[in-house]
């Protein structure tokens, strides 16, 4: 099945059911705030390499973490008791995103391009993106950022500069989201790390029901 090419003069996406088995749905378009919000409201997200056209993805099965089911291992719980751990939300969104980029750029490469940084900073300024970081004993240990639509957090990337940095940031984020009645943290793709933190697969239909709850609220 050919991949859908987005028109330049209209902000639309094809039916996600038409996507490839691996989740690739469309190519082209731009990273405008309007297009990104439409994409995430349908479970679609951009993911591509520098120099490539924008690729849009919508996996048929979704990997999520329910905030109330975040898993804190015995060793992480001990670490949190031993150290002073503090949550930082939106300390400096562009800086958090750039730290995520730097952690990958010179190793396996990164999809966080200059255009991506500008686009998600624009989302943040309009209240549709958030950064969460963990400060351990007065030092920023790690963090993550993502998109917010209604009561759903769509995770994009994370970084860790010190022991347990990304784990702590994810736990602190989940605790905040649970308190605020969020339905899910969308992980986009499965990784062993996210599974160890409580990630699980759900069907696209159930995933879209969570997004629909926000539209009805």
Image (tube, rainbow, N blue to C red):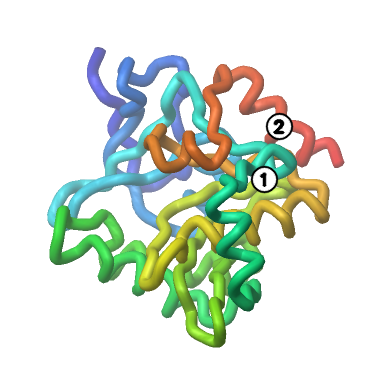
Picture residue at 25% right of the left edge, 47% below the top = 48
Q: Nearer the viewer, residue 85 or 169?
A: 85
Q: Nearer the viewer, residue 64 or 153?
A: 64
Could you say which disc has been placed on residue 152 in the image? Answer: 1
Quarter of the image with the N terminus is top left
Which structural element holds mark 2? helix
Picture residue at 36% right of the left edge, 25% below the top = 23
Relative to 118, does residue 193 appear above or below in the rendering? Answer: above
Residue that mark 2 sits on: 210
Which structural element holds mark 1? strand
Point out the tag, 1 or 2, that comes first from the N-terminus: 1
User: Is 106 positioned to the left or the right of 141 in the image?
Assistant: left
Whether residue 163 is visible, yes or no, is yes
Picture residue at 64% right of the left edge, 72% below the top = 87
Q: Please report contact status of discs 1 and 2: CB closer than 8 Å, yes or no.
A: yes
Whether residue 118 is visible, yes or no, is no
Relative to 65, does residue 150 appear above or below in the rendering? Answer: below
Residue 45 percent across, percent down from the top left: 43, 42
Distance in Å between CA atoms under marks 1 and 2: 8 Å
Residue 101 percent across, percent down from the top left: 30, 66
Within 10 Å of the Cα at label 2, are there few (<14), some (14-19), or many (20+) other Cα atoms?
Answer: some
User: Is 210 positioned to the left or the right of 204 in the image?
Assistant: right
Quarter of the image with the C terminus is top right
Q: Nearer the viewer, residue 196 or 14?
A: 196
């Amino acid at each position: 099945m050919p991949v859908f090419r987005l028109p330049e003069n209209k902000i639309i996406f094809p039916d996600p059911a038409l996507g490839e088995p691996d989740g690739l749905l469309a190519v082209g378009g731009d990273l405008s705030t309007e297009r990104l919000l439409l994409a995430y409201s349908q479970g679609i997200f951009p993911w591509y390499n520098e120099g490539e056209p924008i690729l849009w993805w919508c996996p048929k099965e979704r990997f999520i973490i329910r905030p109330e089911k975040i898993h804190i291992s015995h060793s992480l719980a001990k670490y949190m008791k031993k150290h002073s751990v503090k949550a930082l939300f939106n300390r400096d969104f562009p800086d958090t995103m750039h730290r995520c980029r730097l952690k990958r750029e010179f190793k396996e490469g990164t999809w966080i391009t200059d255009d991506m940084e500008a686009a998600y900073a624009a989302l943040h300024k309009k209240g549709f993106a958030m950064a969460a970081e963990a400060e351990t004993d007065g030092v920023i240990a790690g963090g993550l950022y993502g998109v917010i639509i209604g009561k759903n957090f769509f995770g994009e990337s994370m970084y860790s500069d010190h022991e347990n940095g990304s784990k702590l940031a994810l736990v602190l984020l989940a605790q905040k989201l649970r308190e605020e009645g969020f339905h899910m943290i969308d992980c986009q793709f499965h990784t062993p790390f996210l599974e160890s933190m409580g990630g699980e697969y759900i069907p696209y239909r159930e995933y879209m029901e969570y997004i629909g709850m926000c539209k009805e609220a």
